[in-house]
Amino acid sequence: MSPAAASGFDRGAIKAHQLERLRALASAALASNAFYSAKLSAAGVDARIESLHEFSRRVPFTRKAELIADQAKYPPYGSNLTYPESRYTRFSQTSGTTGAAMRWLDTPESWDWMLDCWTRVYQSAGVGPEDRIFFAFSFGPFLGFWTAFEAATRLGCLAMPGGGMRSLARLRTMLDNRATVLCCTPTYAVRLAETAAEEKIDLQASRVRRIIVAGEPGGSIPATRELIERLWNRAWVVDHHGMTEVGPVSYECPARRGALHIMEAAYYPEVIDPETLAAVAPGGSGELILTNLGRTGSPLLRYRTGDLVKRAQESPCRCGSHELALEGGILGRLDDMVVVRGVNVYPSAVEDVLRSCRGVGEYRVEIRCERALPEMSIQVEPRAGRDEAASLAERVAAAMHAAFGLRVGVSCVPSGTLPRFEAKARRWVRADGRFDRFDTL
């Protein structure tokens, strides 16, 4: 069953496929993967998995800290390799923004599996061979850049790399070559539009009709999505998500904006209460747990992603898919939540409020501890060309109070003061200037 085909299958067929793949994965891991052979054997798990429920009940979680420790103990790639190193042809590495960077190796078969997943992302976004896709990435060692690019070429699209270019050069390349699709982070889509305004480039001349975003929650945040589409002459924003260590995971539902479907032909997903570890029912929120079903050379079983999601109530979906849907996409990271005066505050919720305030060009959130309790303040930068600086801070403060019931100090800084970002934005900082766990937001 391919990722594209799974959307047409009912729950019974999807579960049967997942169970078959889990058995094969466990068999391969027990035979020759030192990392998982030890974990599964210690838990008394063999390849005779009777059901998905049994798999979830008996197989232990995998945590990022384990993988980092394993690579430190067995450098440079750790022991989570099912085959000899000579079988691997692809190297990737996480950004290291939330801890030590992890290195990841893939076989040609695993790489093709991930290209199949990316093809599903493109198909759900209405992208086909007639499209010209511009990739506004630096093309470092991060997995998503390369899999997205190669999947586009395999689909028959004209793929244009934007590495090593400044924003103005990227804009001109897109316009000159009549790009119809832009791939970037939500933050950088806003930055490119900002650059166009600074350089007096009219984006109405752009042929970009789809903007596929990832790396940040913004693509599923209504206010951020609406801002990008307004800046880009109503080009349609499409969200998806993935991780270097897991692969491309989801595609945006073509019938419900802001809902992400897990590609269940490629993944066995679970949503659990992060405290009790119990499964969350439809309509509930919890941590997303993923097992990749086709990345046999470097598998992950029951990986605790740390992503906060909400399971959809509706099944099958309005689009016809029986695959798990996540309402609002990735709502945030469990370790990014800040409790301010008893109120749980997630960065994605703050961004939705700030982007809803017309006139905010960029922002920065500072967390400081006063008497051991977290406090929050916000700097906002007005959009270029808007004469709203005097009232902008007041409007943002009022919006924050209405949304969270918190009185937050908001100050307005001159245009161009705050940093701009090409990849993941770093808008949340501690009072001492360090990013720590907020460095990807």
Image: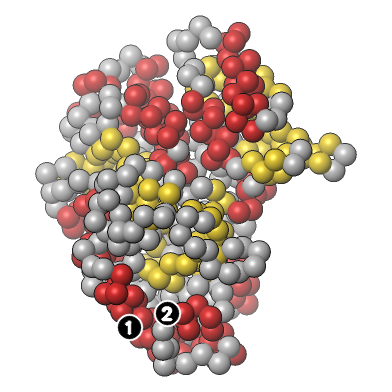
Q: Nearer the viewer, residue 50 or 77?
A: 50
Pointer 1 or 2: first along the chain:
1
- Could you tell me which residue is drawn at 48 percent across and 75 percent down? 301
* Quarter residue 390 falls in: top right
Q: Measuring from the top left, give residue 271's x and y in whole percent.
A: 50, 63
Residue 306 in the image, given as x and y percentages of width and height: 56, 59
Query: Where, quadrant-wise, is the C terminus in this rendering?
Result: top right
**Residue 140: image location, x then y, percent:** 42, 51
- Helix, strand or loop for disc 2: helix
Report whether 398 appears left or right of 382: right
- 312 on left or right of 406: left
User: Viewer-proximal residue, 85 or 326?
Assistant: 326
Relative to residue 418, is residue 113 depicted above or below? below
Q: Quadrant of the N terminus?
A: bottom left
The residue positioned farthest toward the right in the image shown: 371
- Residue type at mark 2: give it: Leu
Viewer-closest of 84 and 318: 318
10 Å crowding of disc 1: few (<14), some (14-19), many (20+): some
User: Which class describes the residues within 10 Å of circle 2: few (<14), some (14-19), or many (20+)?
Assistant: some
User: What residue is shown at x 70% (from left), y 27% (from top)?
Assistant: 408
The mark tally for this picture is 2
Task: Tell me where residue 426 appears, x and y as whole percent.
Answer: 57, 39
Tag 1 and tag 2, C-beta contact below 8 Å? no
- Using the image, tell me which numbered label, if any, was put on residue 52: 2
**Which residue lies under the disc numbered 1?**
20
* Kind of residue indicated by mark 1: Glu
Give the CA distance from mark 1 to mark 2: 10 Å
Q: What element carries label 1?
A: helix
Q: Is residue 152 shown to the viewer in this render?
A: no
Here the colouring is secondary structure
